[in-house]
Image (spheres, helix red, strand yellow):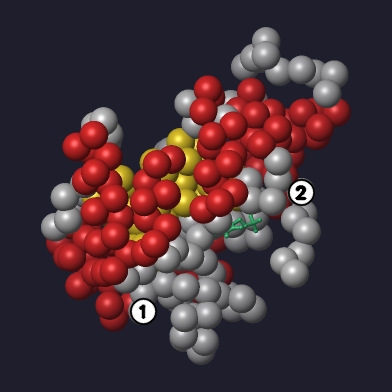
């Protein structure tokens, strides 16, 4: 497919196009290898990269983008409001940011405690009353790191069922599924296998919540093998990020 709005003379656009194609190929190969018929949804994580890059990616067919910090997401979604992108919030969230996040977010992947779910529901309710909007899709983030609890955020596996029940009852929120980050230094296949098992027991109760948001640049193949429905890919498409200070 060619899009006439893609400027082939812009070197950054060509670079992004090549990297995006390479990731799409990996996704397609892993989907076939897993015996699956449909590829997961690609979400490009654009944190630390400028809005201009997201605009280039949209011209290359990207529809879903993610950010992990509210301020950056607010700025970029404001600059790119003409593109009709779906914005995913994937970072750790404080209750006092809920009002801001629901202004742009199509989905939040990092709900890990009842207070956050409650704050999001309250903020969405105001939007629904004022202007109408679709329910906010929420993924419960699961902490798969047995050794360093809370290290990368997320609810403990034992707390997922009660959080799912709580969230599913809140008006304005839609329980979409589970999200996890493979523990640092661990074996991603093991982590994603565990996530798939937690997902299976949750969907036995919440049949509509079959989403699995898993898989980053380094481990997307393992995530696809274990049923990921949403991939969150940053550096393999956009390049490396400056280290956090
Ligand atoms: C940054 C980030 C990603 C993307 O990671 P890459 O390794 O750059 O692909 C995915 N998920 C979350 C939660 C992130 O913060």
Quote the CA–CA distance across marks 2 and 1. Answer: 32 Å
The answer to whether residue 81 is left or right of residue 52 is left
Quick one: quadrant of the C terminus?
bottom right
The answer to whether residue 37 is left or right of residue 127 is right
Check residue 241 in the rendering and tell me which mark sits there, or answer none.
Answer: none
Asked whether the viewer can see residue 221, the reply is: no
Disc 1, SS: loop
Asked whether the viewer can see residue 133, the reply is: yes
Mark 1: give few (<14), some (14-19) or many (20+) Cα within 10 Å: some
Quick one: quadrant of the N terminus?
top right
Q: Residue at x 24, y 44 (%)?
A: 126
Q: Residue at x 63, y 46 (%)?
A: 46
> Above or below — where is 148 with respect to 164?
below
Residue 157: percent from left, percent from top: 33, 77
* Ligand 1 found in image quarter: bottom right
Q: Is mark 1 within 8 Å of ligand 1?
A: no
Mark 2: give few (<14), some (14-19) or many (20+) Cα within 10 Å: few
Residue 150: percent from left, percent from top: 47, 81
Q: Looking at the image, is mark 2 or mark 1 earlier in the sequence? A: 1
Residue 83: percent from left, percent from top: 53, 24
Please tell me in which quadrant of the rendered image residue 37 appears.
Answer: top left
Mark 2 = which residue? Answer: 239
The answer to whether residue 62 is left or right of residue 39 is right
Q: Residue at x 64, y 55 (%)?
A: 217
Disc 2, SS: loop
What is the residue that sits farthest to the bottom in this orientation? Answer: 147
Question: Looking at this view, is 122 or 108 the one in front?
Answer: 122
The answer to whether residue 149 is left or right of residue 8 is left
Check residue 156 in the rendering and tell me which mark sits there, or answer none.
Answer: 1
Q: Residue at x 16, y 50 (%)?
A: 171
């Amino acid at each position: 497919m060619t899009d006439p709005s893609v400027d082939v003379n812009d070197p950054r656009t060509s670079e992004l196009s090549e990297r995006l194609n390479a990731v799409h190929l990996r996704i397609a190969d892993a989907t076939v290898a897993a015996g699956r018929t449909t590829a997961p949804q690609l979400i490009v994580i654009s944190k630390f990269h400028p809005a201009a890059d997201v605009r280039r990616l949209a011209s290359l067919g990207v529809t879903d983008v993610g950010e992990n910090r509210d301020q950056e997401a607010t700025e970029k979604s404001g600059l790119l409001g003409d593109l009709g992108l779906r914005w995913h919030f994937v970072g750790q969230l404080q209750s006092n940011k809920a009002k801001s996040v629901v202004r742009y977010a199509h989905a939040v992947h990092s709900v890990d405690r009842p207070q956050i779910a409650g704050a999001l529901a309250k903020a969405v309710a105001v939007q629904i009353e004022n202007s109408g909007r679709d329910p906010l899709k929420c993924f419960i983030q699961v902490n798969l790191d047995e050794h360093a609890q809370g290290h990368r955020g997320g609810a403990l596996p034992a707390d997922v069922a009660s959080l799912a029940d709580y969230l599913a009852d809140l008006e304005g929120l839609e329980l979409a599924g589970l999200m996890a980050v493979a523990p640092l230094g661990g074996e991603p296949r093991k982590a994603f296998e565990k996530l798939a098992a937690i997902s299976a027991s949750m969907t036995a109760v919440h049949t509509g919540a079959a989403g699995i948001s898993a898989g980053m640049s380094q481990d997307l193949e393992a995530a696809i093998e274990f049923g990921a429905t949403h991939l969150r890919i940053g550096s393999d498409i956009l390049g490396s990020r400056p280290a956090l200070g």
